[in-house]
Amino acid sequence: MTGYAPGEQPSDDGVIKLNTNENPYPPSPKVYSALRKAINPSLRLYPEPLSDSLRSVAAGVYGVPLENIIAGNGSDELLSMLLRCFVGPQDRVAFPVPTYSLYDTLVEIQDGVSAQVNYPEDFSLPETLAGQHAALTFLCNPNAPSGTLVSLPEIAKLARAVSGVLVVDEAYIDFAATEGASSVPLIRRLPNLVVLRSFSKSFSLAGMRIGLAFASEEIIAGMMKVKDSYNLNRLSLVAATAALRDMAWMKRNAQRIQRSRKRLSGALKRMGYHVYPSHANFVLARKKNQNLRPIYEELKRKKIFVRYFDAPGLQDCLRITVGTPTEVNVLLKEMVALEV
Ligand SMILES: Cc1ncc(COP(=O)(O)O)c(C=O)c1O
């Protein structure tokens, strides 16, 4: 199996799904063949408890010792582990908003206190984030839903200024337009920094549930204590390891998405939207003070799903996942038709 023809995706139900930031391209063919080989009687055995095979391949790819890496059942599981490690009742957890909604949900589950700091209009790092006396501070970088990116010097400064642990959620970093935007190398000199990665977006493996966290040995050892014994199943471990062995596949798809993102952003701007500079596989398009629910509903009627947030400050926005060139064309055609 070699994957889809360039720019195409089979669509069996006629739905164009641009609402949850999945990758429109398939996983590497090497992932498929590794999975096929792994379907054998060894499935009766428990998987590796510490995901050592995946961690050692990740160590090579990211240039970080194995002791500084932990694998999770999606980065969502790693987020949940971090809350259990560092946040007790009434502890403060700071993050700029709007951002990934799970942070707030996890804080509530833990009986912690969310210290939400509004992003300025341009989604630059809020100056007051560091002074929140938080046990944990989250920074989603690139941010969801804006797609905007904070620079490494700003992140290093933030890590030094916060009172507790800083978690940089890099679920979308492989789509960044800037080379060397990842905070992973910073963990060597910043002992309170945790960097999260997901295999759901750039590696096209949302269905397999795999994430990685990079941090000091001490933090990783603490996270190991709270994790379930066998948190990654055998097939997910195989898929993740094979995906990391074919970085060229992931990078090629990320580049295709960057090109489509540029075209989509340009077209939306010409239609009068403000489009935030996106470093992710989605764009946030705003029509200032115009509720975009009717556009979202109309697109849904045409089986094109984009994300509308019925939340203060975001009702004049649509978040659109970057699809294949064909999907982008269909979306734009419908959006232009709705303008008139
Ligand atoms: C910012 C952010 N972090 C983490 C996740 C969760 O990723 P995973 O599928 O690895 O659990 C998502 C998923 O949409 C996300 O948007």
Image (tube, grey):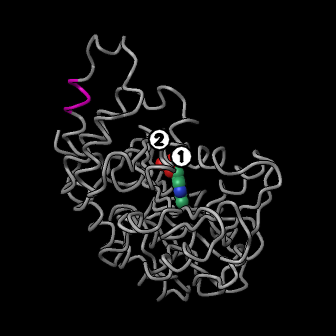
Q: In the depicted view, which residue is nearer to us: 144 or 153?
A: 153
Mark 2 secondary-structure assignment: strand
> What is the crowding at mark 1: few (fewer than 14 residues within 10 Å), some, or many (at least 20)?
many
- Residue flagged by tag 1: what amino acid is it? Leu
Q: Residue at left 74%, top 69%?
A: 133
Marks 1 & 2, CB-CB < 8 Å contact = yes
Report whether residue 303 is seen.
no
User: What residue would you read off at disc 2?
Assistant: 72
Q: Is mark 1 within 8 Å of ligand 1?
A: yes
Lateral position of residue 288 relative to residue 160, left or right: right
User: What residue would you read off at disc 1?
Assistant: 78
- Residue flagged by tag 2: what amino acid is it? Gly
Question: Can you give x and y, in whole percent of width and height, for residue 130 in the image?
Answer: 66, 77
Instruction: Please state, as top left, top right, bottom left or bottom right, where the C terminus lies in the image.
Output: bottom right
Q: Is mark 2 within 8 Å of ligand 1?
A: yes
What span is colored magenta in the figure? Answer: 33-37
